[in-house]
Amino acid sequence: MLAARGGWAPEHQMVHPVAPGFQVKGTSTFFGEDGAVKAQWVKTTQDSERVREALEAAVHAMAADLPKVAPRKARGCWRTDLMVGYPIGDPHIGMSSWRAETGEDWDLQIARRVHCEAMAALVDAAPATETALVVNLGDMLHYDSMEAKTPRSGHMLDADGRYAKVIDVAVATMRQCIESALSKHKFVHVVNVVGNHDETGALWLARLIATVYEREPRVTVDVNPSVFNYHRFGKVLIGMHHGHTCKPEKLPGVMAADRAKDWGDCLHRYWWQGHIHHESKKEFPGCSVESFNTLAAKDAYANNGGWRSARTMQAVVFHREHGEVARSRVNAAMFEEAA
């Protein structure tokens, strides 16, 4: 199967291997009356898996030479029985929205300010806990390559700035969110969930952040490339999934299979999702599945499609024995007024 994808299957008259980084999209073969091949056309396309692997390896190698954050002594008193989770829903950094068309402005500068200030406000209101969980729920980047379109469907997107600028703002925003959490909490665990807009970007972002903080023992980063991520705190188990590959009703079973021991040990089980941009929560036997708002504005596609979700971000407080015990919330308008 792999050989055929690369153009080699002699028993089917495929004898022209394609170049590295490409795969066969299709072949057309002309046979003569004697059954011999008279002509053949081989159509190729980029091998998305190999391109992603190559890009991931390149970014990982480049990140090794970046300046590392020096360890800082933790100061303060922290509650060890509580953990604060900061789910960041679909930031869509790199998206462009024009107020005259959609009723809301959005660009790189606004995206950075709104997310950083929202995170700072939530941290300021949160209890001083020993542990914090910072979760990018996917689609941190609005697009995933030099072309402003979704990776799988090829849906064209409204974009602000070159891809290099999008990378700069996404990294700076994520780092500022982590720094805000470090100002209140002793330890910060970071998760970058793979989204449908940034299937590749989420992978290199996780590894880049992990490299930057590799000398800081107070920060741990999940670099698991799966679309499913998990974090356990006492008798609390949190699963994180963008929501684009698995229906909500299947997620409790996925958690039970992936984390069988944790499922049995924990009394409080939660799934966090992004993707749909609106708030929803459904309880299933043994587990709840919740989706979170985005702070990002509507783009033209969402506006024309009639989507009108609230734009909020939350902090969720968990007790290690009793599960969720409190929440706080901010909305995007609180930080847009300074524009």
Image (spheres, helix red, strand yellow):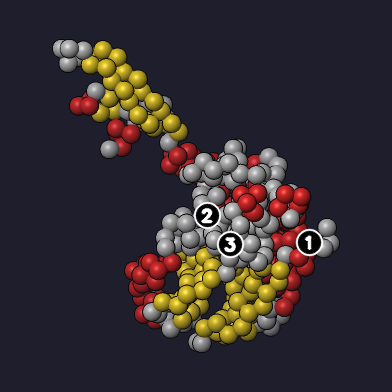
Disc 3 element: loop
Q: Amino acid at mark 3?
A: His
Q: Is residue 321 visible?
A: yes
Coordinates of residue 139 in the picture (x, y in percent): 57, 54
Question: Seen from this angle, which residue lies furthest left?
Answer: 34
Q: CA distance from mark 1 to mark 2?
A: 25 Å
**Left or right of residue 337, residue 10 in this image:** left
Mark closer to the chain start, 1 or 2? 2
Q: CA distance from mark 3 to mark 2?
A: 13 Å
Mark closer to the chain start, 3 or 2? 2
Residue hosting label 2: 195
Between 247 and 111, which is closer to the camera in this rendering? 247
Question: Seen from this angle, which residue lies furthest bottom?
Answer: 322
| Quadrant housing residue 164 | top right
Residue placed at 17% from the left, 12% from the top? 33
Between 279 and 193, which is closer to the camera in this rendering? 279
Q: CA distance from mark 1 to mark 3?
A: 19 Å
Q: Are marks 1 and 3 in contact (CB under 8 Å)?
A: no
Disc 1 element: helix
Residue placed at 29% from the left, 33% from the top? 3
**Left or right of residue 81, residue 99 in this image:** right
Residue placed at 45% from the left, 62% from the top? 228
Q: Amino acid at mark 2?
A: Gly
Crowd around label 1: few <14 · some 14–19 · many ≥20 (10 Å): some
| Quadrant housing residue 267 | bottom left
Coordinates of residue 303 in the picture (x, y in percent): 64, 54
Residue hosting label 3: 277
Q: Which mark is residue 336?
A: 1
Coordinates of residue 260 in the picture (x, y in percent): 35, 73
Between 284 and 79, which is closer to the camera in this rendering? 284
